[in-house]
Amino acid sequence: MAEQRRERRALVVWGGWPGHKPQEATELFTPYLEENGFTVKVTDDLDAYLDLDGTDLVLQCISMGEITAEQCKGLETAIRGGTGFAGWHGGIVDSFRNNTDYQFITGGQFISHPGGFVDHEIKVVADHPIVAGLTHFDLRTEQYYVHADPTNNVLATTTFRAHPDYPWIEGATMPAVWTRTWGQGRIFVCTPGHSLEDLDVPEVRTIIERGLLWASR
């Protein structure tokens, strides 16, 4: 008798700064996960990170906020063991600003978005299933300036124009989409995604959907 395939399990965790509409934003992707065979649990309680046994994917959307040492350790242990970790914008790279252990896991930290909402281009720079068929696209939204880990696998970048207050950033190229591994776990980050409208841009939506599936165990 053929072995029955185990149904995959995803944990969706939302919270933090309400301006990023974390609950509504994650609700855009929950049906997609279910359509792709995941049993999805949704919570706003970080104590869920204390027991991630059997979880194949964690989708996190928590801008700023706080995490305890125990919660962070639970997440780190799960990712190291093979649980995927994914998210976009401040929900993953501006979470838990005071926790450098967490930032080490994600491979990047939001620093600024000079000019607020600005016109900018996202340019694909790698051959990877997450960005297959895409070359570049334009956005008018927050352009994230990040401090990033050189071991990231950068899939797309964005280049900054000069800003009156920071003229020296002209020409600075930042990673906008990246993957990385942490032990046996896969991590996916997409820095675009400030608003619900951003998440409905076809290229952004496609990259995030593919990234979720790629990151999963």
Image (cartoon, grey):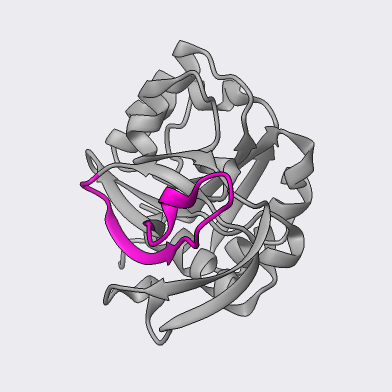
Position of 197 relative to 113 (above/below): below
x 50%, y 58%: residue:
162
Residue 215 visible in this rendered orientation of the protein: yes
Of 1 and 65, the residue lying toward us: 65
Position of 192 relative to 23 (above/below): below
Asked where in the image residue 1 lies, by quadrant, the reply is bottom left
* Number of numbered markers: 0
x 48%, y 51%: residue:
167
Residue 203 is situated, as x and y percent measured from the top left of the image, at 56, 77
Asked where in the image residue 216 lies, by quadrant, the reply is bottom left
Image side of residue 12 versus residue 128, left or right: right
**Residue projecting furthest to the bottom:** 133
Position of 121 relative to 4 (above/below): below
x 43%, y 58%: residue:
170
Residue 78 is situated, as x and y percent measured from the top left of the image, at 37, 32
Q: Which residues are magenta?
A: 150-173
Asked where in the image residue 44 lies, by quadrant, the reply is top right
Of 100 and 31, the residue lying toward us: 100
Image side of residue 170 versus residue 77, left or right: right
Of 91 and 173, the residue lying toward us: 173
Image side of residue 43 versus residue 155, left or right: right
Image side of residue 86 versus residue 90, left or right: left
Residue 162 on the magenta segment: yes
Residue 38 is situated, as x and y percent measured from the top left of the image, at 55, 57
Residue 164 on the magenta segment: yes
